[in-house]
Amino acid sequence: MHTQHSNQKRDLFRERSGAELHINLSAIIENYLFLQKKVESARCSAVVKADAYGLGADRISKALAKAGCKNFFVAYLDEGIALRKILKKEFSIYVLHGLIGKHEKLFLDYNLIPILNTSEQIKQWYQFCLQNNVFYEAGIQLDSGMSRFGLDEKEIKDIPLAVWDAFKPKLIVSHLACADTPEHKENTQQLEQFKKLKNFLPNAPSSLAASSGIFLGKAWHFDMVRPGAALYGINPTPREKNPMRSVVTLLGKIIQIKTIHPKTFVGYGASYKAKQTTKIAIISVGYADGFFRSLSEKLYLVHEKFMHKPLPIIGRISMDSLFVDISSLPKDATKIGDKIELVGSFNTLDSIAHAANTIGYEILTSMDNRYYRIYK
Ligand SMILES: *Cc1c(COP(=O)(O)O)cnc(C)c1O
């Protein structure tokens, strides 16, 4: 009874929603297995920070754990705490922002591994371990050239040797700045710098590559790779055909249809003026849903029943809606409630990002909670 009731409730939510975000869990798993195979003996982990790039860290982590993924990365402590409620103790959860504030005990309570990024964080963790007389697992991040997180050469050399004697890092991490541009010389420089810096630390498993870094070659793989974007279908090799399977489909609904006369304006700022009699559909997705205003008049969408007929977005995208010109569709073929594909096979995350002058990561992480989510 209960499930029947909640199914009915879910159906009503689906009916009332402005748009549906379909998330293909089996495509994520296929992407994971593909990357694991590609890195051979190195371990493939999963980066599920920012709620798995907006797609649902709980559902995705559970599915990846089932598929054999043992190591997970989040950015914040509270993301780690939330994830530990889903993943059993045998799965490692690394917190990339490391130890911020005096929360050492929370890392222990939830069995989370901090990635220590500064000398202060290392000292603090060391003191905490001394007090408890146990050396708890922690990772160390090294700055191999990006100037973001981690210790540089001088900071590493300033760490008292006693610390390293007691403290065996669980994982040594660094991050690449230009991995999506294979010919960039920074890739080799960072690789060499990472190897050099690692020599000042006790021997420990290491990890340098995220999604794009995996495609630079075996030298960048070390013991573990940390893909996020590629798991979710973003192209890790932007110059080449996307080797990953597409994961998300975003379908917006038509909530109004009208026919306008020549010379009629459409939308804010009257930026668009109809040249002829035009049939327009108003779709219930706008920039508050993460469909950027900068995409106004830059993109074509498709009706799910007429995938071969691109429909231009006309006028400016509003907060909760946008307009498409549906004049090219067969007469009377469209009705209220019909679905228009915004992201999927016609527009990929990467092509939309290109039109919005950004990267697929930002398109994905901007996807709003107003979307009704369906996992496959
Ligand atoms: C976000 C992040 C990743 C994942 O990067 P992708 O490009 O999405 O694969 C890996 N490592 C670190 C340190 C990160 O911050």
Image (cartoon, helix red, strand yellow):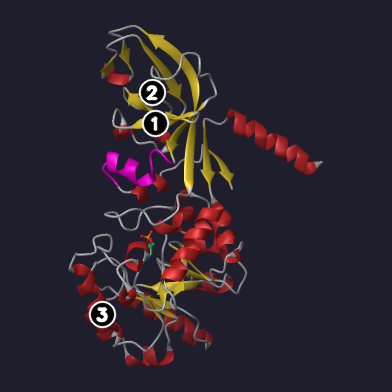
CA separation in Å, label 3 and label 2: 56 Å
Q: Which mark sits nearer the N-terminus, 3 or 2?
A: 3
**Location of mark 2 (residue):** 324
Farthest-out residue, left: 185
Three-letter code for the amino acid on which mark 1 is drawn: Leu
Q: Is residue 294 magenta?
A: no
Three-letter code for the amino acid on which mark 3 is drawn: Glu
Give me the residue at 28% from left, 60% from top.
180
- Please state the extent of the stretch shown in magenta in the rendering: 345-358
Tell which tag, 1 or 3, sits nearer the viewer. Answer: 1
- Asked if residue 90 is positioned above or below residue 371 in the image, the reply reads below
Q: Say left or right for 251 vs 229.
A: right
Near mark 1 (Cα within 10 A), the count class, few <14, some 14-19 or many ≥20, is: many
- Asked if residue 276 is positioned above or below residue 243 in the image, the reply reads above
Q: Quadrant of residue 89?
A: bottom right
Give me the residue at 24% from left, 64% from top.
182
* Callout 2 secondary element: strand
Dot 3 and dot 2 residues touching (CB under 8 Å):
no
Dot 1 and dot 2 residues touching (CB under 8 Å):
yes
Farthest-out residue, top: 261
Q: Which mark sits nearer the N-terminus, 1 or 2?
A: 1
- Asked if residue 191 is positioned above or below residue 315 in the image, the reply reads below
Residue 37 seen by the camera: yes
Q: Is residue 351 magenta?
A: yes
**Location of mark 1 (residue):** 301
